[in-house]
Image: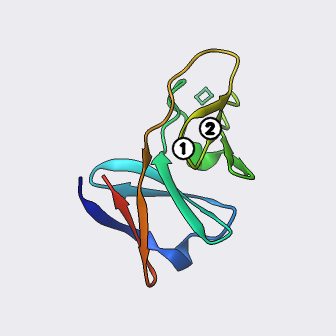
Amino acid sequence: MTMIKASKTSDITPGTLHKVSVDGKEILLINIDGSFFAMDNTCTHAGGSLSEGKLDGSTVICDWHGAQFDCKTGKLAKFPAKINDLMSYKVVVESDDVFVEV
Ligand code: FES
């Protein structure tokens, strides 16, 4: 596992979904009241881009068919069918830099 700089904290507005590319992976960065979280950006249902979805508290809702994932763990929170959890990643913030462990 390697820590890679993914963004500046100032680029991730609280309450928004921010897509970045880290080591060839599409990662979703989320800032909830100054705490940063990272998970895969691609929905495990049918490949929707979660950065185009909505954030409700700490739940990310896919814009395609409504699957809900906990952004702190990547785990599926709600969907009528069984689909896989998302991979979540460790985040470290140093001054204004956000690093993701991939
Ligand atoms: S692609 Fe995300 S819910 Fe279907």
Q: Secondary structure at mark 1?
A: loop
Question: For mark 2, what is the residue?
Answer: 69
In percent of width and height, residue 95 lies at: 44, 84
Q: Residue furthest right?
A: 56
Q: Measured along the vertical axis of the image, is residue 42 above or below residue 83?
A: below
Q: Secondary structure at mark 2?
A: strand
Binning the other alpha carbons within 10 Å of mark 1 as few (below 14), some (14 to 19) or many (20 upward) gives some
Tell how many labels: 2
Binning the other alpha carbons within 10 Å of mark 2 as few (below 14), some (14 to 19) or many (20 upward) gives many
Name which quarter of the figure residue 92 lies in.
bottom left
Asked if disc 2 is less than 8 Å from ligand 1, the answer is no
Find the distance from the CA under tag 2 to the CA under tag 1: 8 Å
Q: Measured along the vertical axis of the image, is residue 79 above or below residue 90?
A: above
Give the residue type at disc 1: Thr
Q: Residue at x 53, y 24 (%)?
A: 46
Question: For mark 1, what is the residue?
Answer: 73
Name which quarter of the figure residue 87 lies in.
top left
Give the residue type at disc 2: Phe
Badge nearest the viewer, 2 or 1? 1
Q: Residue at x 70, y 48 (%)?
A: 54
Taking depth in this image into account, of 70 and 64 the one nearest to the observer is 70
Q: Residue furthest bottom?
A: 95
In percent of width and height, residue 75 lies at: 56, 35
Q: Measured along the vertical axis of the image, is residue 75 above or below residue 97?
A: above
- Left or right, 61 with respect to 21, comes to right
- Report ligand 1 position as a quadrant: top right
- Left or right, 34 with respect to 94, comes to right
Q: Measured along the vertical axis of the image, is residue 64 above or below residue 70?
A: above
Q: Residue furthest top?
A: 81
Whether residues under marks 2 and 1 lie with C-beta atoms below 8 angstroms apart, the answer is no
